[in-house]
Image (cartoon, rainbow, N blue to C red):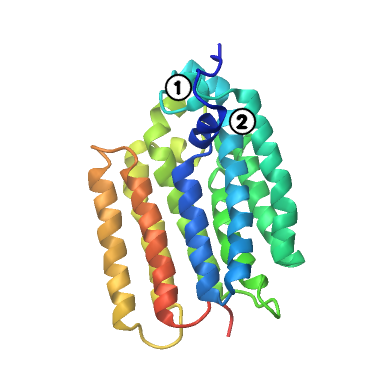
Amino acid sequence: MLQRPAAGPVLSGLVKACHPGPTAAVTVLVATLAVVAGHGAAGTALVAAAVLVGQLSVGWSNDAADAARDAAAERADKPIATGAADVRTVRAAALAALLLCVPLSLAVGPLAGAVHLAGVGGAWAYNLGVKATRLSWLPYAVGFAALPVFVTLGLPGQPWPRWWVVLAAALLGCGAHLANVLPDIPADLAAGVRGWPQRLGAARVRAAVPLPLLAATALLVFGPPGPPEGTGWAGLVLAAVLTGAGVLLGGRSPRAPFLAAVAVAAVAVLLLLADGAAPTAR
């Protein structure tokens, strides 16, 4: 049975339930990408606001959807399971954030907003059941790929991003999915959740995590015309070091592979910045 919230403030429970680390990381990285793409201060703030509320809705809906399962597993890292947050409050917050995400996304641009909302909708579909299927990777791939499209379509003239930027983002999403699920595979299998990583098993997932992350980085290095510059090679080496460290430290810290995936995503944005141009088609 789910516990009632503890005496702590409701706001504290909501913050813990929104997956604050990934929410902040995705928002900051996309805001940085908006600056790289050529958005001004107002446009970047609007993009960041839309992404933030979208990520909040995804994080809260995830914890609300998994509340009963997390309570049964006595998950100490889940505020609803520990009583630090109430499932009805978290569910209401998720719906409110989703509703707010609609006008904020469309304010960036009708087509851009539609793309972002499709990505957020895919994440909700993951939370509501796709996570337990063979296609659990798909919402991550679509959601991450939608982010650079959202950013560039919000620019004057609605330019599309370069193809390798979109594909690299999709690969980063697949890598993030594997890394994020890795620590929870035993508990997920016990609860009957059999998504793509759970079917692969922990050992195979641990070995597979670096592959999409390094492939994404390689696309950003070798995708642009002309030979790679020194910064590209340095970025590729740094991504390899980060993914390797994530795998090696995974035994000590279950979240290390996911933190490495976030760091590689940051490297990807820095590579676009070093490229000296917006991630739009030329």
Name the residue: 50% across, 74% down. Answer: 36
Name the residue: 41% across, 67% down. Answer: 268
When the figure is inspected, residue 131 is found, relative to residue 150, above or below; the finding is: above
| Figure quadrant of residue 67 | top right
Crowding at dot 2, Cα within 10 Å, few <14 / some 14-19 / many 20+, comes out as many
When the figure is inspected, residue 184 is found, relative to residue 154, above or below; the finding is: above
Residue 193, percent across and down? 52, 29
Q: The C terminus is located in which quarter? A: bottom right
User: Label 2: which residue?
Assistant: 90
User: Label 1: which residue?
Assistant: 190
Q: CA distance from mark 2 to mark 1?
A: 25 Å
Name the residue: 52% across, 72% down. Answer: 35
Residue closest to the eye, 202 or 116: 116
| Figure quadrant of residue 50 | bottom right
Q: Is residue 133 visible?
A: no
Tag 2: residue type? Val
Q: Which mark lies nearer to you, 2 or 1?
A: 2
User: Which of the two labelled residues, at mark 2 and mark 1, occupies the earlier sequence position?
Assistant: 2
Crowding at dot 1, Cα within 10 Å, few <14 / some 14-19 / many 20+, comes out as few
Tag 1: residue type? Ala
Residue 8, percent across and down? 49, 23
Given the current orientation, which residue lies at the most extreme top position?
1
Name the residue: 69% across, 44% down. Answer: 98
Helix or strand or loop: what does disc 1 sit on? helix
Q: The N terminus is located in which quarter? A: top right
Q: Is residue 44 visible?
A: yes
Residue closest to the eye, 39 or 160: 39
| Figure quadrant of residue 243 | bottom left
